[in-house]
Image (cartoon, grey):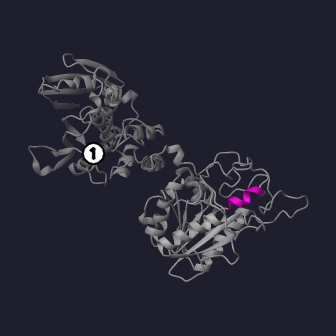
Amino acid sequence: MFMSISTTGTPESPATDLGFLLHKHPGKVQRFGTSHGEAHVFYPEAGDELCTAVLLLDIDPIALVRRGRGKGRGGSPDFALAQYVNDRPYAASSLLAVALRTVFRTAMKGVCETRPGLADRPRPLRIALPAVPANGAGEGGGPAMVARLFEPLGWQVEAVAIPLDESFPEWGESRYVRIELASATVRLADALQQLYVLLPVLDGAKHYWVAPDEVDKLLAAGEGWLADHPEQALIARRYLARRWSLTRTAIERLELARLAEADDREVEEVDNAVDDTDRSEPGAADAPGAEPAGEGPAGEGPAQEGAPSKQPSLAEQRRAAILAALREVGAAWVADLGCGQGELIGALLKDTRITEVLGVDVSARALSAAARKLRLERMPERQAGRVTLVQGALTYTDARLKGFDAAVLCEVIEHLDLPRLPALEYSVLGAARPAAVVVTTPNAEYNVRWESLPAGHVRHADHRFEWDREQFRAWAERVARTYGYTVVIRPVGPEDPEVGPPTQLALFRIGTTAESTATDPVPVRTTPEGGEPR
């Protein structure tokens, strides 16, 4: 099997620069050993106007049998049927992809030390592959699949199905395709990475066992193009030999990378919903669903000797207040936005009046933890059908959030940077527009009652801010006016006569005439620096 790469040039940028990009001298024939044969690189033409490099892979069928793992799951179907007579030595497949990585490893990294900047610039490329298996296996193979995979990446695609026998056209077409790709906008390093991934995808099989580390290889080679590819799911599924657990992991990580890039943040910063800190520390005091360290079960200060042990925790009181608000508005379809590990979802499922629950979180780890805690795989089918868990960022509009009776933001807003809060306001109340929205957040005034929390500290290390009652009320009323809602502010947990409750709740309702303030007046306080965003 072989592949050719051609480029054109000018006197200022000669085509022979291809040799610098590939790190292979145009005047030499070079040979490289692989685990299944030998790879040869040579240049049939090398001039200033046109230069062509060829990678020829000479497969040893005996080595393929002795070293390969083609049998069984993840292996080539042809190889499993005929170990010594098959298409592997002739058709471009995962064998050629592995040879690409072996021979052009430095070129795939986009490194050219002898000509700084050369690898960063695209140049006219034409890549020819005389025989590529494009077995659709029910997923639409042949030339159509080639176009679906390469055209979104900026390639002009010429793909022609090869007949079974040109002398007998009535026999029809084979599963092999002759491919030519042309582009003036793709860097050579990106082209090689794309071929490394997409050749096995077209074949739909690999000559070796697909282990979990293949997910890392896919994401590394797909950096910069795979996350936005319209056939992302197809690529992940076929590259990973239809191993569903690996495919699911790859897609989750791709989505997380896309969200992190959109927010201009590191993946670790975005995927932080599952808190690994020791929750006995004061800084983790108000993690969602957790109790402040050293506090009594009702959030009323330190536990006293002989105090009742069955009082509801603050987290339980918070969930009870949310459920009461949802019953008040008659919600049957509920979206838990920023669902974390699914504590609220579990409470929602116990209410038979709620028929559908959507859990949304930016963290794939949090969603996996929620699925485990809820035991979705063991849940009766009818019950499991009420729950859907999806990954998404609440600061972007999402059509999946539309049509719900109510949305809940339980201890979520304080985890956003203040400049990003308006984006969440618009995506939830402006774009999704559920009939009701329930928001809970800590009351910063109550922090003085936590003896284990140092003065001036927030309750959780990931909290970007915490508002007092007046700040929360001002924010809620402004948002309600902006998006056509009314709002009621309610306390959650035991109210302290001086500093109020530990948690505050806002119930937004659309198209109602509900009172926009709580019954008890809230003392006016000066908004400190870092308060409600304007």
304 vs 229, left or right, is right
Residue drawn at (60%, 80%) of the image? 515
For residue 20, what is the image quadrant? Answer: top left
Magenta residues span 443-448
| Above or below, comparing residue 105 to residue 430 in the picture | above
Image check: 159 left or right of 332?
left
**Residue at left 35%, top 47%?**
235
Q: Is residue 500 above or below residue 283?
A: below
Q: Nearer the viewer, residue 514 or 158?
A: 514
**Callout 1 secondary element:** helix
Question: On the image, which quarter does residue 323 sit in?
Answer: bottom right
**151 left or right of 330 in image:** left
Give the residue at the far left of this rendering.
Answer: 167
- Say if the magenta span includes residue 445: yes
**The one of 130 and 483 positioned closer to us in this rendering:** 483
Crowd tier of the residue under label 1, counting other residues whose Cα lies within 10 Å: few below 14, some 14–19, many 20 or above: many
Residue 184: x percent and y percent? 19, 39
Q: How many marks?
A: 1
What kind of secondary structure does the magenta stretch mostly adopt? helix
Q: Residue furthest right?
A: 306
What residue did someone put label 1 on?
A: 153
Q: Residue at x 42, y 43 (%)?
A: 73
Rendered-image quadrant of the N terminus: top left
Badge 1 amino acid: Leu
Task: Return the residue found at the far bottom.
Answer: 513
Question: Is residue 182 something one can see in this rendering?
Answer: yes
Q: Is residue 524 magenta?
A: no
- Front residue of 207/279: it is 279
Q: Residue 505: image x %, image y %?
A: 64, 68
Is residue 84 visible in the rendered image? The answer is: no
Which quarter of the picture shows residue 84?
top left
Q: Position of residue 469 (x, y in %)?
A: 66, 65
